[in-house]
Amino acid sequence: MAKFLITYFGLCLFLSVSVKAQISHGGRPLPLMATKSLTEEMFVTMPPFDLEEQLRLDSLEATDLRSAFRFAYKFMTDHTPENSGIRFTLPDGTKVWRLGIRSEGALSLNILFSKYHLPEGACVFLYNNDQSEILGAFNHLNNSGRGILPVAPLPGDELIIEYQEPAEAAFPGKLAVGEVNHGYRDFRVSEPQPDFTAFKCMPAVACFQDTTTRYNDIERSVVLLIIDGQIGCTGTLVNNTANDGRPYLLTASHCLNNQFQIKNPDYEEVAGKIICYFNYNSPQCSPVEPGRTDQTLACAHFRAVNERTDMALLELTDTPPTNYRAYYAGWNAQDAGQPPYSCIHHPSGSLKRISAAKGHVELQTYKIAATEFDETAHWKVARWATGCTFAGSSGAPLLDSDNRVIGGLTGGASNCRNPVEDFFFSIQKSWSMPQDSSKQLKYWLDPVGVTVPVCTGMDPNGGGGTATERIEAATDVRLSVDRYQHTIRIDFAVPASRTSLTVVSLTGMPVRNYSIVGQQATLPVGPIPAGVYIVKIVYNNKLYTQKILF
């Protein structure tokens, strides 16, 4: 491998955060010109593929499902510092690897690190060939139990990966580029979208926010999803009855299972390759402006899927940071609530749009050729008063007048010229049946066991969810606090297999989240402002709470 020595010392700038996944941790890559790196030696080129054939196959996949929005073609690869790119060493001993990836004609490129495990002090950047678009740094805080890292798209048909490892690293980092996805449709990166006829009736959320505050909170729960580097859908961050800030994500199962074409898919593997864009919306109604693309999270865990209704529930690996201003949507698993109804969604991977329905909704049996759904499992929207839905809207929430989620978009055929008949899987019908916890919502969204299956939304940055109950001496949970060591000691009568503990401020904002396995644990709280907090513990499907002082 070619080696170059340069003088440059502005390496990785790290922020002190506890989250991982897609979150970037600051800094800038090395200047390209200083290393003469823009050489063919650095690049690998993806082979050509038959775009017309791919578009034909996409058309064959089209069903009565609203359909996920396929925008990229996947190449399976195995590029590592040992077999691709160039390597060189800086005067201070820092080892650098650069790999350029080229796929002619691509509108965007995104990759999956199929191996990702970095020592402290190491970092990775991804950027285009003039460094006008930069992702990263990603560092040891992005390590995960899966050992992978999906990365969001960059515009254009070239991207460059840069890995920096300090001379005194505790161990050699592991990196492998296992997938390269060639974007052949406009997706996000080309915003603002032209005035497609299909979009003209679907106003940006900002168009409503000049006249009402109704959507100010709930729109922050809706996220744009990239699934497996190829597919765009919509998801919703939802609350649970413990108000503990667990980042549950509701979407449609056909988004995860490629239009139900895969028998017995590995949903955990699919969940691990998800990327979520928060706050991808226009700041104003007209003209529509590009949304922000720097607030992302990657990777989730599979929690529940019911293909008989089209429901899918995931849990993000990490809690959205405070600056994402995420909102946890409430839900109604009892009935349809009251009109008017609305849907916030990302059609074709575009900026966040809103549709508003006329009249009531009713449960109906949704019949399509692709699969067989349960009877009366879907809410039917007979007609939209404003807007419609589109490919990529799949999974988007159907909201009642209280902005509670009552369902998620499965399919239909609405368009601007004929905005009629869309179908949303019903939360009510996906609630407690079947009894298998991996196929229902109740087990995950109702750890407290409420009498009426209705939950309000929660703003972790602005209140809600303050506890009033206390842990009694006679309970199965014992809690003690060391104010000087800043630790919490927790003991259970019976070993815990699925327990969460959340430290919440008096305003309702979660400040620490823990998962506990076993019968006892000592949890490091770390530095937090002095004051009174509330500890919430979900143990054996019961909520235990207690005020504490630091």
Image (spheres, rainbow, N blue to C red):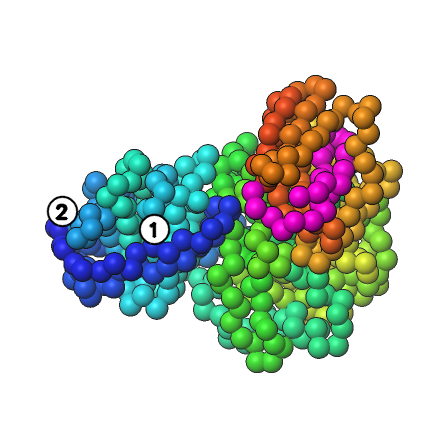
Task: Give, as a three-letter code, the residue at label 2.
Answer: Met
Q: Judge left or right: residue 196 versus residue 29.
A: right
Query: Within the image, what quadrant is residue 478 found in?
Result: top right
For image coordinates 32% across by 63% down, the residue present is 128
Q: Is residue 13 visible?
A: yes
Q: Position of residue 479 (x, y in %)?
A: 71, 30
Q: Which quadrant would the C terminus be assigned to in this image?
A: top right
- Badge 1 marks a residue whose secondary structure is strand
Residue at far bottom of view: 286
For image coordinates 58% across by 62% down, the residue present is 279
- Main SS, magenta region, reads strand
Query: Within the image, what quadrant is residue 429 found in?
Result: top right
Q: Residues within 10 Å of mark 1 (few under 14, many from 20)?
A: many
The residue range painted magenta reads 526-550
How far apart are the two marked residues, 2 and 1, measured between alpha carbons? 19 Å
Residue at far top of view: 494
Tell me: residue 345, above or below residue 505.
below
Q: What label does residue 500 carry, if any?
A: none
Q: Which residue is mark 2?
A: 1
The reply to whether the magenta stretch includes residue 532 is yes
The reply to whether the magenta stretch includes residue 35 is no
Q: Is residue 383 visible?
A: no
